[in-house]
Image (tube, rainbow, N blue to C red):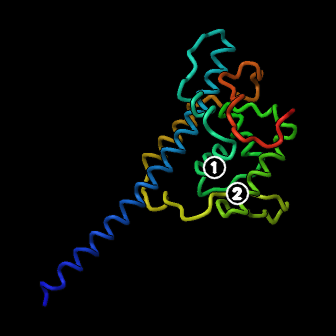
């Protein structure tokens, strides 16, 4: 009788192991996406600093590829994933898009366009829309479970803090826009509200 129970017990163990592996992989994927956003933002800022000092650098083919092949919704999704489990306001999403190298000047009203994309993502259930009680403003976060919660990423958190510490993006507000390298003129397919 005990031997008859062994296969089902093995199946259950295998199932639990596979379930945990999937959760770990999703958590690692989220961490990779978060790191990619940080590195892309650093590349933009460093390119601006090099340009301001008259130093020539070769543009990142990988960063350019991501700008050209990603739609506006794709990039907003990436930014929200990187911020998960936190929430972002539309103006924070706009700033993050600019730090990734997107040229939003081709939109008649960039903030309204971003808000529209976020609203549509909320209507589809892809993101959660919340209201801040104090000021009534909207915030958005990726819907669904937070895979990172199942992964202990002490080293990952240290790496992120280290990136924040050494990344000079805090200086971006003092840099002229003309120094921003690799701007994403073609960074969003199927764009809404573009200038004629």
In terms of sequence position, does the residue under pointer 2 or pointer 1 come before the other? 1
Q: In this view, does 180 lie above or below 148?
A: above
> Which residue is denoted by mark 1 in the rendering?
77
As drawn, 179 above or below 62: above
Disc 2 element: helix
Crowd tier of the residue under label 1, counting other residues whose Cα lies within 10 Å: few below 14, some 14–19, many 20 or above: many
Taking the spot 63% from the left edge, 45% from the top edge, the residue there is 74
Position above or below: 28 against 163: below
Residue 128 locus on image (x, y percent): 68, 63
Residue 11, given in percent of the width and then of the height, sits at: 26, 74
- Residue sitting at 84 percent across and 62 percent down? 136
Q: Quadrant of residue 53?
A: top right
- Which residue matches tag 2? 121
Picture layout, residue 142 above or below residue 9? above
User: CA gap, disc 2 to disc 1?
Assistant: 9 Å
The number of discs equals 2
User: Which residue sits furthest bottom?
Assistant: 1
Marking on residue 93: none
- Looking at the rendered structure, the secondary structure element under dot 1 is helix
Q: In which quarter of the image is the N terminus?
A: bottom left
- x and y percent of residue 38 in the render? 57, 37
**Horizontal side of residue 80 vs 135, given as left or right:** left
In the foreground, 83 or 25? 25
| Residue found 13% across the figure and 87% down from its top | 2
Please tell me in which quadrant of the rendered image residue 104 appears.
top right
Q: Is residue 169 left or right of residue 153?
A: right
Q: Where is residue 4? Give x, y as percent.
A: 15, 85
Q: Are marks 2 and 1 in contact (CB under 8 Å)?
A: yes
């Amino acid at each position: 009788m005990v031997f008859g129970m062994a296969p089902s017990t093995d199946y259950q163990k295998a199932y639990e192991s596979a379930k945990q592996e999937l959760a770990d992989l999703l958590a690692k994927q989220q961490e990779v996406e978060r790191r990619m956003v940080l590195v892309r933002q650093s590349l933009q800022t460093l390119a601006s600093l090099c340009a301001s000092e008259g130093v020539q650098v070769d543009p990142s083919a990988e960063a350019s590829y991501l700008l050209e092949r990603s739609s506006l919704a794709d990039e907003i999704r990436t930014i929200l994933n990187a911020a998960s489990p936190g929430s972002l306001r539309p103006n924070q999403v706009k700033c993050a898009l600019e730090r990734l190298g997107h040229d939003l000047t081709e939109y008649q009203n960039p903030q309204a366009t971003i808000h529209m994309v976020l609203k549509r993502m909320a209507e589809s259930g892809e993101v959660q829309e919340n209201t801040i009680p104090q000021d009534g403003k909207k915030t958005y976060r990726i819907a669904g479970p937070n895979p990172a919660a199942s992964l202990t990423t002490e080293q990952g958190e240290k790496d992120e803090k280290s990136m924040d510490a050494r990344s000079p993006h805090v200086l971006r507000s003092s840099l002229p826009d003309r120094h921003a390298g690799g701007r994403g003129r073609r960074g969003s397919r199927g764009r809404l509200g573009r200038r004629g």
